Image (cartoon, rainbow, N blue to C red):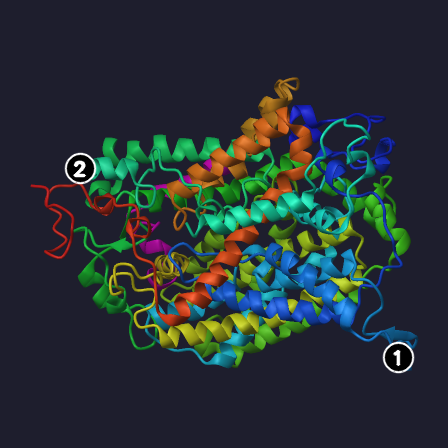
Amino acid sequence: MVEISEITDDDVERGPGAAIPGGGEDDGDASSPIEQVRMTVPATDDPTLPVWTFRMWTLGLLSCGLLSFLNQFFSYRTEPIIVTQITVQVASLPLGHFLARVLPTRKFRAPAVLGGGEWSLNPGPFNMKEHVLISIFANAGCAFGDGSAYAVMIVDIIRAFYRRSIPFFAAWLLITTTQVLGYGWAGLMRRYVVEPAHMWWPGTLVQVSLFRALHEKEDSNQQPAEGGGSPRKTSRAKFFLVALACSFLWYAIFSKSVTAQQLGSGMRGLGLGAFTLDWTAVSSYLYSPLVSPFFVTANILAGFVLFMYVVVPSAYWGLDLYHARRFPIFSSHLFTSAGTGYDINAIVDKSFEIDMDAYHRQGRINMSTFFALSYGLSFAAIAATITHVALFHGKEIYRRFRASRKEAGDKPDVHTRLMKENYEDAPGWWFYSLLALSAGVSLLLCTVLKKEVQLPWWGLLFACAMAFVFTLPISIITATTNQTPGLNVLSEYVIGLILPGKPIANVCFKVYGYMSMSQAVSFLSDFKLGHYMKIPPKSMFLVQLVGTMVAGTVNLGVAYWLLGSIPNICQDALLPPDSPWTCPGDRVFFDASVIWGLVGPRRIFGALGNYGALNWFFLAGAVGPVIVYALHKAFPKQRWIRKINLPVLIGATASMPPATAMNYNSWLLIGIAFNFFVFRYQKKWWQRYNYILSAALDAGVAFMGVLLYFTLSMENRNVSWWGTAGEHCPLASCPTAKGVDLGSDSVCPLVL
């Protein structure tokens, strides 16, 4: 079994027989081996609580549709706001209690085809399990925390960047199939990453903690004793409301040296000293720093510092790697060899493929050194993921596979035991049927509508095979570290070698390969939440499926509306200076479609391009975990060695760009403060309030974002003052090489 030392800090381990916070004694394998789980998840269940209620469906569908609308709308902003399911958890509680009071209690007889029996619009008090299912419904509305359906970006780049069109129906089929395809093989892997206790999925504990704070009464031993005694502790619900209010109210209330601004800029440079308490900037790309275990934060810190403050400065100022100083130090844009912006539309022909004559006239594509090296790290991270999981988890996976075939295994922990005793599992044929149906529709899309997607049928099958192979190892990484390595770079690299010159085929292959895997991991994460909260698996499956279908449809509708109504959306060079519609995520997605699809990796990372040496990162990533594993075996008493997680460390800066140094600085400092210092020295406070604080900050940001939309954005108004005018470092995006002239309209000085 995987050692706890890998997934927790030294001081959070407990042996059998240790007291469990919240009551009872640790009875060995029957309780969770993870202290954070024992401190957060109740080891009890009431299987009589109704979950399949009219209230759940009404509030679930409403919240799913609303979050889908808001997240798609906010995804085009320079600092995107993701309205998470936590917002729904807060808002749906009073609505659920309201419906429990006003709905009629009359009972009806269900038809025999539906199983018979009695049902009611109002079966009793609004309960926690209904609330959990509403939240899971909403989670599909925010694409399991990612904001909006990934495949919508294909529509965005076709319409906003390539200035072409795609039929709504073809786009809808593409989004729907990519969102549900991975659910099929996720069902096959539940026994490996949901039932095992050491697969603890840290992100789910925020939800568990908030549900308990909103529904459970405070323990009687927390009341003050008669005649004095210790003061009353602040309840978790009250703490949540106070923190939410503070988060909400927060939003109501240089020199001429290019090098200096490159060093200090948190948006376009290295971000030395850049820090913010703006929770939107802290959690926009890496999500809440209060959730990740400290060893994960430490790995990300090491990777970020090494890359940002050693590798990039050395490559830019020291080596002038790939003529680095001709370009900005931090940029996701593409350039000509002269340092000017690359005109992508000039090299696209009428068939939506590359025009080689036009390409040769403009010359090879160039990237900022930061952007190029970040691709190298992506190569290393995906190779390290395979090696790391094989070495550190291979025996466990094989053992559980053999045990599952023999229908035997280790003694389950209390949560798995309660689920098996009280609820019927979702039938396997549900998952197989969904897999067959979504794969069949996808094949029709790639044959009947091939002109729109450019992807041949064999490309689809190849993408599915790749996603299936990687789902289990990446699920294990996510379940133990709260970080999810992606297949986006690997998938676009592979299909770019096979089908160069076809940008839409490339992104479609990437979405089928990467997104079906990502959706499978998210599906399993929600199943773990249901596992902790004792939700019937059949209800979990149906709610996730319906929510995903609704969310994708709303996402696409909002995208078509905004792309057709906001002039020059996503074109930062054509938008007004203070416009929020710069679409940073879509910009990176578009550049990727050019690099890997339109031009192709052979002309970027092969012999015909400038960046062939970056392929050695694949080898370095594969070898890295072997070295760590050898050191772990050679020095078994040095437990910190096993906590070196190279897929996380190497992939630490995978979100950059569009994430910036300021996002990382703030995330790391807050994460270390709470998950090292507070966890170690104020553990009772951490146990009681840490996840509640995370939820409150997320909810405060979301509510303020919604308020600003309805009060300002809908009226075409904005608040303009120095605090909303950016970071005042315009020279950070300038090149430093001599002779690079960006024109008279540029703020950059010409270096002679």
Magenta-colored span? 596-623
Q: Position of residue 249 (x, y in %)?
A: 48, 50
Does the magenta-highlighted stretch encompass residue 619?
yes
Does the magenta-highlighted stretch encompass residue 256?
no
Tally of numbered tags:
2
- Marks 1 and 2, Cα distance to the nearest angstrom? 76 Å
The quarter of the picture where residue 103 lies is bottom right
Disc 2 secondary structure class: loop
- Residue drawn at the location 84% of the way across and 52% of the way down: 419
Residue 650 versus residue 358 in the image, above or below: above
Q: Position of residue 154 (x, y in %)?
A: 44, 67
Magenta stretch, overall SS: helix
Q: Is residue 437 visible?
A: yes
**Looking at the picture, which amino acid does disc 1 mark?**
Phe
Q: Position of residue 499 (x, y in %)?
A: 42, 64
Residue 322 versus residue 176 in the image, above or below: above
Residue 108: image tag: 1
